[in-house]
Image (cartoon, grey):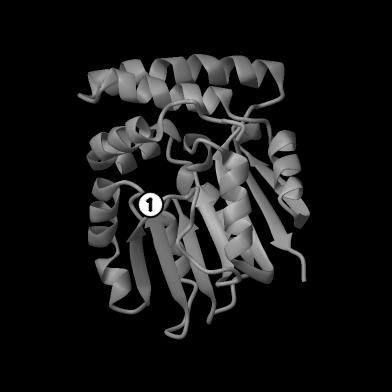
Amino acid sequence: MVLTNKTPEEKVNSLFDRVAPEYDSMNNWISMGLEKNWRRETMKRLNIKVDSKLLDVCCGTGTWTADLANELSNEGHVTGLDFSKEMLKLAETKLIDVEQRKNIHLVQGNAMELPFADNSFAGTTIGFGLRNVPDASQVLSEMTRVVKPGGFVACLETSQPQNVFVKSVWNIFFKLVPVIAKVRGNNYADYDYLQKTTKEFVSANKLKEMFEEVGLQKVTYKQFSLGAVVLHIGYKSL
């Protein structure tokens, strides 16, 4: 196993349990309110059928899970999986209104070993979670395994801007994130970890290669905010 994140899983799990109450508000602040735009553009590109059965890996507080559910009819179904109990508690609260109209199921589990049978879902997604798992390739392999032939695997994740000026500004901003998080009453070390995983994660081109290495085809990616965030989409062979 080639580690893309060397922080032990139990430490990452504890961190996300701690940051859960402020996770959504901090994400909105860090993204300068642009996260909603990234997700909206992402949903336009997925072409989800209304009766699909979908899986949202590392679902966190359920933001993307809700977006997926809102694309479906009552015949569709979304499963949200995360390893953090505290994140899932918040997701349950957030999804109450959606659950009155949609079929949503939340599961505590490990993205490295998805507790689902082969070829179970029409599509799988992971939003801002791939950089936090021990082995991103293993998670992509698992997401591919549980998708039906022809189904999609989609990842929305922070990336490395290629423009030198943009990258320098980006680096300065993320170094300030844990400082500002502390001022806002959050734990400095937690957000220092999060900014480091952002800075150290693979480039958009490398992640495209990783998609292809697990057998996904027609892999494309779309950059947002001058390359600071990238959406990758690949399809399982028929």
Q: Is residue 19 above or below residue 80?
A: above
Residue 45 shows up from this direction: no
Circle 1: element type: strand
Q: Which residue is under mark 1?
A: 82
Image quadrant assignment for residue 2: top right
Q: Is residue 50 above or below residue 187?
A: below
The total number of labels drawn is 1
Percent across and percent down for residue 169 are: 56, 17
At horizontal 37% and vertical 77% (from top left) the residue drawn is 102
Residue 137 shows up from this direction: yes
At horizontal 25% and vertical 68% (from top left) the residue drawn is 96
At horizontal 41% and vertical 16% (from top left) the residue drawn is 176
Is 33 situated left or right of 184 in this image? right
Identify the residue at the far front of this view. Answer: 1
| Quadrant, the C terminus | bottom right
Instruction: Between residue 220 and residue 165, name the one nearer to us.
Output: 220
At horizontal 71% and vertical 63% (from top left) the residue drawn is 236
Instruction: Between residue 35 and residue 8, name the one nearer to us.
Output: 8
Q: Residues within 10 Å of mark 1 (few under 14, many from 20)?
A: many
Percent across and percent down for residue 139 are: 56, 48
Look at label 1 and name its amino acid: Asp
Percent across and percent down for residue 167 are: 63, 19
Instruction: Between residue 18 and residue 40, name the one nearer to us.
Output: 18
Identify the residue at the far bottom of this view. Answer: 75
| Quadrant, the N terminus | top right
Is 160 situated left or right of 24 in this image? right
